[in-house]
Amino acid sequence: MIFASRERAIFGQFEAGTGALPGAGGVQHLARRLGRTRAIEAIVSADDFDADTAERYGWINRALPDAELDGFVERLATRIAGFPPEGVRAAKRAVNDLTLASAAHVRSDAVTFQSLIARPESRERLDHLAGRGLQSPGELERDLGKAVADFPGDS
């Protein structure tokens, strides 16, 4: 389950902006959660999505006011923890069996991801983003959709 702060959460898959695709099962995961057309939008646009849009798209369960998020999650976890554990585990297994990507599909995406990020064009874009603060707390990480679209030389 995924719950997010309306005021603070940002969702996105910036990889297409670097010439790659989401790795580690990202394509599989998003296609199943969002559906085909919204997954294509999220992946190919490499844009940022706020929590309300992510909720509408099915990316997350709920977008909640930041002040209510922790309390909501704690109440939900406490409620679920009070149920017989075998039933909870069986329900999760059954849903996972129907909705999660197979290991083979995730591995296939990983191979494609690795080949794409090894391309010179992708390396150049990733190096540019790294030089601007990729993988570091800060403004770039909160606005990756804009950052991948601001590559020098793009029109």
Image (spheres, rainbow, N blue to C red):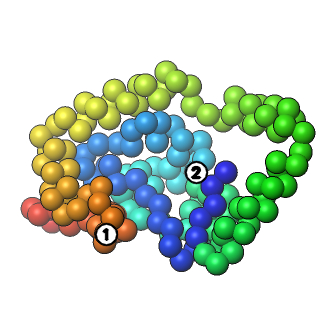
Q: Is residue 125 visible?
A: no
Q: Which residue is mark 2?
A: 34
Under tag 1, what secondary structure?
A: loop
Residue in front for this viewpoint, 93 or 75: 75
Q: Residues within 10 Å of mark 2 (few under 14, many from 20)?
A: many
Q: Residue 76 at what x, y percent from top left? A: 78, 58
Q: Amino acid at mark 2?
A: Leu
Under tag 2, what secondary structure?
A: helix
Q: Name above or below for residue 30 compared with residue 86.
A: below
Viewed as shown, does residue 150 lie left or right of 88?
A: left
Q: Is residue 15 visible?
A: yes
Residue lying at 49% horizontally and 26% vertically, measured from the top left: 105
Quadrant where the C terminus sits is bottom left
Mark 2 and mark 1: span between their CA atoms? Answer: 28 Å
Q: Name above or below for residue 61 compared with residue 85.
A: below
Residue lying at 15% horizontally and 51% vertically, measured from the top left: 127
Q: Residue 116 at what x, y percent from top left? A: 25, 36
Q: Residues within 10 Å of mark 1 (few under 14, many from 20)?
A: few
Residue lying at 28% horizontally and 32% vertically, measured from the top left: 114
Q: Which residue is mark 1?
A: 138
Q: Amino acid at mark 1?
A: Gly
